[in-house]
Image: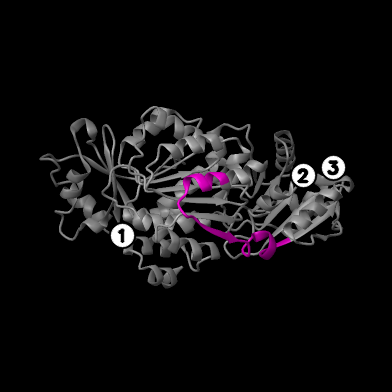
Amino acid sequence: MGFQIIKKYSLSREIAKALEDLGYEELTEVQEVVIPLVLAEKDSIVRSQTGSGKTAAFAIPICEKIEVEQKNPQVLVLTPTRELAVQLKQDISNIGRFKRIRCAVVFGRQPMEIQRRELRQRVHVVVGTPGRTLDHIDRGNINLDEVQYLIIDEADKMLDMGFIEQVEAIIKVLPANRHTMLFSATIPDKIQEICNQYMKEPVKIEVDSESPSLETIRQFYYEVEEEEKFNLVTKIIYTEKPNSCIFFCNTRDKVDDVFEKMKQQGYSCGILHGGMEQRDRLYSIHDFKRGEFQFLIATDVAARGIHVDDISLVVNYDMPLNSESYVHRIGRTGRAGNVGAAITLVARSEYRTLHEIEEYAHYKILKLEIPMVEEETLLLNNRDGLEPISKIDKSEKLNRQITRIRINAGKKTKMRPGDILGAITTIPGISGGDIGIIDIQDTCSYVEIHGNKGELVMEALGATKIKGKIHKIKEVGFSNKLY
């Protein structure tokens, strides 16, 4: 994104550095339109497809406008799924990293107490699923009196999942003078009613031209009956040689079945479906992003909220149940300007559904002839395997520039962020701009040092008094915790 956005919107040095390090280069259409609206504090309704860059469209300007010294949350982001909530939290944290913006995520199937403790600290942005967010509000765990921005993401999905009443209940307790942004692939009547009732003269934006299904994805199909599907898949892998690939199935049982067959053939693969424990789901996504396995076999739980760089192929092992699901599935590839491929396995009885998808996507999907590959060639290919390619995600790239230090004093000894900040800034050569997020826990504290100043701080802090006392310090790595 470079100088284009930095000069155009006069972004702060901290946000500009994060965007540069994260590899943003050009604005997408939705970012071109939404960023100035947020900076101008206009309400907006944005209809855009997956892969359009909408997260950065709101994350960049809200991170720019956040007042870091303010204790209570200034931004609330509501999103339908736990996976998407974690993804949004990571994206916002990355963009706001050098500005010391703290983002908390709340969702179900995680202990309330863990989330409550985090919400008690200084948090600038809260990302949550509607049910768990409302639960925290009812328990008094979260103070939303100073929320200035409400972002409702994947609004149509929340409507489909029955969350819209919870969304409305949350809106009713927010300050009336906030600014609201709603993002949705479609705008059903109920969503429009909510916009009419709770938004102030919203600007309506429609972004279609960057739909990945139309411009950056080669789409094909094979005619094949169920009993021949897996044999065809091995041929597709041989001919396409994907570096990273998702297979979509309609049921959990089918995911498990395909996964077992893939493992037996020696492929490096993982699974993702709604029947898994939440921790396992998050780690499966995390490991796939890092390139620790090459093939992800998943239900539609993976069709939204999974942003993985360089997925070269999506295979609809099962025909999607509807046209919208098809668009979301194949939208996992062809992202960030890359060209991807999507292959759908179609039985004779499913041609009507295929034609409905073509009409919906305004795209004629090309039929391919089944590859002629000898069984011995396939066996040799499978025996050798396809090596997964390790990847470094964006968070890890930023972490490499930051030294994280642990101090053995926390809330129980009345340690405060200002105490740590004051002590470190007395070190010659260190200023407040070199110090990142300070996290005060019960018995210890963590502080991030930016740039190449970590070693200098470590050496000096060991002999520097904090609140009149020398404390033990230790360099620690960044947690692999995903939320």
Query: Which part of the image, by quadrant, shows the C terminus?
Result: top left
Question: Marks 2 and 3, how far apart in space?
Answer: 9 Å
Residue tagged 3: 226
454 vs 354, left or right, is left
In this view of the protein, which residue sits in the foreground, 466 or 461? 466
Q: Nearer the viewer, mark 3 or mark 1?
A: 3
Q: Residue at x 88, y 45 (%)?
A: 349
In this view of the protein, which residue sits in the foreground, 274 or 326? 326
Question: Is 204 one of the magenta-colored residues?
Answer: yes
Question: Marks 2 and 1, how far apart in space?
Answer: 48 Å
Where does residue 452 sit, x and y in percent of width and height? 29, 60
Q: Residue at x 47, y 64 (%)?
A: 24
Q: Nearer the viewer, mark 2 or mark 3?
A: 2
**Residue 392 visible, this angle:** no
Which numbered circle lies on residue 451?
A: 1
Which numbered circle lies on residue 348?
A: none
